[in-house]
Amino acid sequence: MKKIVIALALFGFLGAAAHAEETMGEKAGATAHDAKRAVKKGVNRTKEAFCAEGDAKCLKDKAANRVEEGVDYTKDKAKEVKNKVD
């Protein structure tokens, strides 16, 4: 039991030592990505507000916008995680 506690404490210490922080540039880049996504989302929602209800082309564009927004979000968050790990 004592060996298990010591091993867990050692792994906890090593995990804390390996933790890295983002640099100021990386944090600024993350903020810029968030702002860019917010602007794109706002533009998409504004265009969608003027679409006719039930218009097939409008629904297609709306779905494409959601997919694009999801891809952008995923890419940006993956970069942020990579930067935190580095």
Image (cartoon, helix red, strand yellow):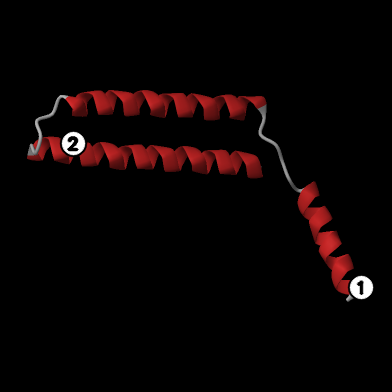
Location of residue 38 in the rendering, given as x and y in whole percent from the top left corner: 40, 26
Residue at the spot x=41%, y=25% of the render?
36
As drawn, is 5 to the left or to the right of 44? right
Q: What's the distance in space between the residues labelled 1 and 2, CA to CA? A: 61 Å
Foreground residue among 56 and 18: 56
Q: Read off the residue under disc 2.
A: 61
The local crowd at label 1, few if under 14, some if 14 to 19, many if 20 or more residues have their Cα within 10 Å, is: few
Q: Position of residue 50 (x, y in %)?
A: 15, 24
Residue 78 pos. (x, y %): 51, 43
| Type of amino acid under label 2 | Asp
Look at label 1 and name its amino acid. Answer: Lys
Q: Quadrant of residue 62?
A: top left
User: Is label 1 or label 2 in front?
Assistant: 1
Quarter of image, res 1: bottom right
* Relative side of 74 to 20, left or right: left
Which residue lies under the disc numbered 1? 2
Q: Residue furthest front?
A: 53
Q: Where 84 sits versus 25, above or below?
A: below
Name, please, the residue furthest toward the right: 2
Q: Which mark is residue 60?
A: none
Q: Quadrant of residue 30?
A: top right
Per the image, label 1 sits on a secondary structure element best described as helix
